[in-house]
Amino acid sequence: MIDRTIFQNKTAAYYTLGCKLNFAETSAIGRQLLNSGVRRARKGQEADICVINTCSVTELADKKGRQAIRKVIQENPSAFVVVTGCYAQLKPEEVAGIEGVDLVLGAEQKLDVVKYLDDLKKKEKGEVVTSKTHRIRSFVPSVSADDRTRYFLKVQDGCDYFCSFCTIPFARGRSRNGSIADLVRQAEQVVQEGGKEIVLTGVNIGDFGHTTKESFLDLLKELDKVEGVERYRISSIEPNLLSDEIIDFVAGSHRFAPHFHMPLQSGSDAVLSLMKRRYDTALFRHKVEKIKQILPHAFIGVDVIVGVRGETDDYFVEGEAFIRSIDFSQLHVFTYSERPGTAALNIDYAVDPKTKHMRSKTLLDLSDGHLRDFYLSQQGSRKKVLFEHTKRGKKMHGFTENYVKLYADYDASLVNKVTEVEVGAYDEDEMAMKAIF
């Protein structure tokens, strides 16, 4: 039984690295501590409890995690420090060995953090509480608001795919999800809080249904009925799980934005095979063409990894040619990072760092041109923009339903309000289109 008197007059600070799913989960941790009487520390105030939610998608993410932990400890030397997230799950003893860390919680424990806080006294060495990957079973609902206007609703967690380059299944466990009924209730709560836009997030959201035997399409249909939500966005979804029925549904929906984000990872079928991906370039091309056929103004974001083991010069050229042949709006380019314990380490051919950098620059330049062209193709059209809280100088920004970034002179009355405008000219300094009222 937890003695909740230890939380009286205590403050907490929260630090999140990595994906939007992590942000949603940090928000859930914060609400749990708030319900126990712990207030959020003010900016610049030394906190009594510090919670750091880490990422481990690359070696650089691990490094950033260590840097963040040390910085937090330096700024809050008396705080009880809790580290969780993917880095904590994958390398708990390494994290516990960082001076000043008191508690390391794994994926199964992090959303029940109060249970593991006892007297909040600093420890000589960090205590580790984790579970083996196959024992990670729980799904805890999480929803968070970012510092702009969006809410991120966690609908799914874990992954069963075990791609050769990826550690996420080891860090987050097997695929699982919340029930449609519970997720609808959370969306309704967002409306009560004044939220206008909800992004559906997870590790492999298209795989929704393992726990409850429901389908992702059924989830979309029920969320679409929630009054007061202006728009939903579907975060990254595997192309083999983005069914034609889902695309058709989005096309006919009044709330789901014409905005798709799919991981391609490579435009070479040989490399996709080495990666153990569950689709080929022909299927990916079909999905892009299907979207553009019925939603010609849809935004299509595409993830690509460069420099994976086995990606020869010829394979990269083949992959680049495929990418140039499809009608995408923007690329998210990631440089391959070797992760311990992954099957990719068994592939002989390794790409040197200089070549990785050159390949990344090639695709980033290609992406910049496509994004600008997509923005310009929308000039003169009328769109609905949701302006954000953030003020940059005398300007504010927001996104249309099809993810075109617009700017306007700051007007507090328009913040978090969906407003129909005309898409004006492109501004290089703002890297956005002008909103014409």
Image (cartoon, helix red, strand yellow):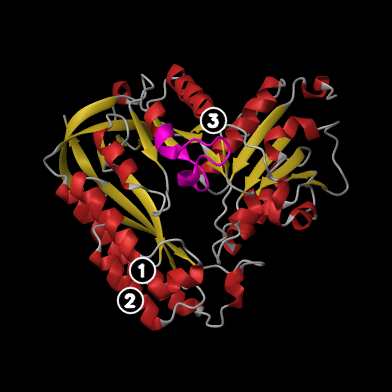
Quadrant for residue 414, please give it.
top left
Q: Amino acid at mark 1?
A: Gly
> From what the image shows, is residue 264 above or below residue 191?
below
Circle 1/circle 3 CB separation < 8 Å? no
Residue assigned mark 2: 318
Q: Secondary structure at mark 2?
A: helix
Task: Measure how far apart labels 3 and 2 are at the Cα level.
Answer: 42 Å
Q: Magenta stretch?
A: 200-219
User: What residue sits right under mark 3 in the picture?
Assistant: 179
Q: Secondary structure at mark 3?
A: loop
Classed neighbour count for the residue bearing mark 3: other residues with Cα under 10 Å, few (<14), some (14–19), many (≥20): some
Left or right for 142, reference 381: right
Checking the image for residue 267, the label placed there is 1
Query: Which callout, 2 or 1, points at the residue further toward the start of the chain?
Result: 1
Q: Residue at x 54, y 57 (%)?
A: 161
Label 2 vs label 1: CA separation? 7 Å
Residue farthest to the right, as pictured: 124
